Image (cartoon, rainbow, N blue to C red):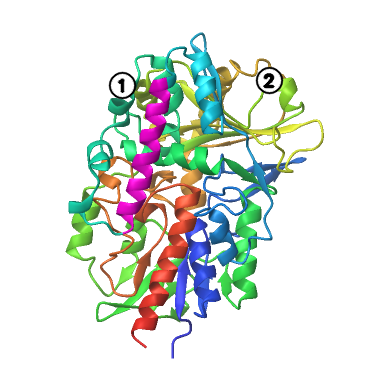
Amino acid sequence: MSDFDAIVIGAGNAGLSAAATLQRAGARTLLVERHNVPGGCATSFRRGRYEFEVALHQLSGVGLEGQAFSLRGLFDSLGVGDKLEFVQEHDLYRFKVPGQVDVTLPADRAAAIETLEEAFPGNRSRVEKFLDLVSNVTILQIAAMRGTSPEQIDPVLFRYGLRPSKDVLDEHFDDPGLKAALGVYWTYLGQPPSKLAFQDLALTLFAYLEFKPWHIRGGSQAMSTAILDSFLAAGGQVRFNTAVSAILTEGGQVLGVRLDDGAEVIAPDVVSNASLPITYGMLENMDVPAAVRDDLATRRIGVSGFALHMGLDATPAELGFTTSTTFVNLDTDDDRIHASWHSLEPARGVCVSSYDVAPIGFAPAGATHVSLVTLQYAHAWDGVPPSDYHRAKFAYAQTLLDVVEHVAPGIRDAIEEVDVATPRTMARYLGHPGGAIYGYDQDRTEGWLFRDSERRPHVPGLHLAGSWAGMGGFQPTLEAGARVARRLMRRKESVR
């Protein structure tokens, strides 16, 4: 008899939602996590009198009470819907290019159109047409992802879905500032508009406009802890500070795992929330299938991030933060910004999360907790020797502050606590090659039309969940873990 019905490797978003879904459906499940807390990117940490959110900038998909197709249904199915308190952001973001653009976009379609018309007069009909296309492409894409055959793909999706976002923006607008303001969510996806499939930008814009941007009181750690508690309450077992050293196989079928202490745990199904290279590299007693090798050889490790977390002894209003999310770019040349991620040249674009415009409870009264993030590839740090690492990371952090002073002049004077994370930090805590935060580079070849790692892992009993097998981000990975678990349970039921 197996020790468990299923083993889940990694307690990131997808691992947690998979484990909770499995256990609550009656599958005896073991969750194994190399860190000492659940969550992966969805965690927090303390410095002085502040708690810092690690990675959640805006949670998409939550929606309003009773709104169909929202994450609330998933949270209810995981047993945590009544355990979480959501904090709504009423603006999508403030976007500023010094001397060129400064616009705050409301999280409401009609209000956003009015705001953009005020900022860029004469473009109302163009913005309306563009947002109509955003909605249509997203709805058609979701329908196609749920089973439409390629021959039945709607002509609108066929025409626009895989086009570079830049081409679609250029087709609708002339003003570079307006194009930059509507396309700035590209930094959430890690590819500039010249490379990013329009269907991905459309999906992101639609998700935040339709379902609003949110935070969680207590941060993403509160969500991770709630899902873990639900898993444990249902009878699940978890091992922290434990790594999986091998995935055991017999006759080409998964048999279980070996832990880093040498213990072997038997289960017919293993769900991996680890990266694909690490997951397949752990297979024991079998060669990696040729189809997998061929697939992985065509993929590129994605972008990581550089984060400056600060506890500031001033209120958001005193600092100049008017929205929870602010994008500050030095110009509207998105390709130039993306190119800078490959080096340690000064940051050219920064995403600012001010978690106390709509407080999540991490900063004392009269203070604020802010994170500054720019994306960056890990190889930018390859030439930095260990002896220069700390000097280099704090020097680079200064360049983020230089950018942010365009919206918060004097911010340096309010710094009370600070912590800096580089791609090396991401690699250490996440265990991801290159510290990649979205898995593989999310270009057009990584979309659902071309990759199907989640549905076809090629090894019987091995199931893949998370950003490395699909789309990155909080909502996609939470949904992926539950989806993979439900599919696994259906297969179990079909053979009984």
Give the residue displayed 41% in from the left and 17% down from the top. 332
Q: Residue furthest front?
A: 125
Whether residue 280 appears in this view of the structure is: yes
Marking on residue 471: none
Horizontal relation, residue 182 to residue 31: left or right = left
Give the residue displayed 64% in from the left and 19% down from the top. 408
Q: Secondary structure at mark 1?
A: helix
Give the residue displayed 39% in from the left and 32% down from the top. 380
The boundaries of the magenta stretch are: 125-146
Q: Is residue 414 magenta?
A: no
Front-most of residues 192 and 210: 210
Q: Amino acid at mark 2?
A: Gly
The quadrant of the picture occupied by the N terminus is bottom left
From the top left corner, tell me how far across and down residue 153 is, in percent: 23, 49
| Residue 186 lies in quadrant | top left
From the top left corner, tell me how far across and down residue 362 is, in percent: 72, 42
Neighbor class of circle 2 (other Cα within 10 Å; few <14, some 14-19, many 20+) is some
Marking on residue 170: 1
Horizontal relation, residue 11 to residue 255: left or right = right
Main secondary structure of the magenta stretch: helix
Give the residue displayed 45% in from the left and 76% down from the top. 6
Neighbor class of circle 1 (other Cα within 10 Å; few <14, some 14-19, many 20+) is few
Q: Is residue 134 magenta?
A: yes
Q: CA distance from mark 1 to mark 2?
A: 32 Å
Whether residue 303 appears in this view of the structure is: no
Identify residue for label 2: 320
Q: Secondary structure at mark 2?
A: loop
Eye-nearest disc, 1 or 2: 1
Q: Amino acid at mark 1?
A: Asp
Please tell me whether residue 445 is drawn above or below residue 18 in the rendered image: above
